[in-house]
Amino acid sequence: MIQRPRRLRKSQAIRDLVSETRLSPSMFVYPVFVREGENIIEEIPSMPGQRRYSPDKLPIILERAANDKIGGVLFFGIPAHKDETGSAAWDDDGVIQQAIRISKKEFPDLTVIGDVCLCEYTSHGHCGVIHDGIIENDPTLEILSRVAVSQAHAGADIVAPSDMMDGHTQAIREALDRENLQDTLIMSYAVKYASAFYGPFREAAGSAPAFGDRKTYQMDSRNVREAIKEAKLDIEEGADIIIVKPGLPYLDVLRAVKESCYVPVASYSVSGEYAMMKAAAANGWLNERNIALEAAYSIARAGADIIISYYALDLAEEMSQ
């Protein structure tokens, strides 16, 4: 007898019980933009619902993150001063360092992740030191290591180098170990594509390059095998977690990396993905709640252990109801 395919026509509770893919608030990391100043909460036009906060206003959003029991927050800094080397990034009183200290004081159980990069801090908007129009890899590693150590001393649980310089993970791991910061984890942007989906973020963080693009040090969107190689190299150098970025347009890459690596894999559902869903929902073309949830399940189904998402708080609240 030929068996017909069966579909569950049961209650929602039973469908949830037998679902192959699960989500929980602890899987989510929420990106937060922190800008220098006081008493500031400002809207980000290209990312409706997202805001920039001055450090003193952070407890408003951090309390929500703590109450929702999400996996953590990821801080991106917007300094008042920029220069050729991004010196504000490793200032012990820099905007990210302030944010980290406030977070650990007010919400000590909330996992805090610091973005380690220079593009928000440099006057030219690139992720490293420039000499004669060329990104200098090794001098950049020295600066990134200083940034990571400064954030770790401020209390960061995890540092997340997003620069895509060769050897960044090893340089940062060695620098942290020299400072007896062995317990600080590294969540490396091992697989970060030179993507057109970053546009709204660059407005939010003020990090658009002043000239050229980042294709010489970020990955070619046509490549998958390169992603596996990059991920494995960063793991060998000491990465505790690796990131694939963007999210939805690179689910095949996420799956390939997950199947090839043995550390937790995070997917960053980036600003362009968020902005598209927001725009479609605002025009009444799609149901925002449903598409945000479906997108998160798709990313988890492809293999993500961690989802970095601007919908993190909304989805965590949805799950707790």
Image (cartoon, grey):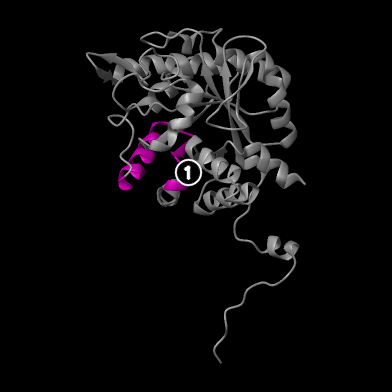
Asked if one can make out residue 308 in the rendered structure from this viewpoint, the answer is: yes
Q: Is residue 307 above or below residue 52?
A: below
Residue lying furthest front? 283
Q: Amino acid at mark 1?
A: Gly
Q: Position of residue 317 (x, y in %)?
A: 72, 41
- Pick the residue in front: 160 or 192: 192
In the rendered image, which quarter is residue 121 located in?
A: top left
Q: Position of residue 105 (x, y in %)?
A: 70, 17
Q: Position of residue 159 (x, y in %)?
A: 51, 25
- Say whether residue 158 is left or right of residue 165: right
Q: Quadrant of the N terminus?
A: bottom right
What's the residue at 66%, 46% (across, down)?
24
What's the residue at 55%, 49% (across, down)?
295
In the rendered image, which residue does mark 1 sit on? 247
- What's the magenta region? 222-249
Query: Is 226 part of what is drawn in magenta?
Result: yes
Query: Is 229 part of what is drawn in magenta?
Result: yes
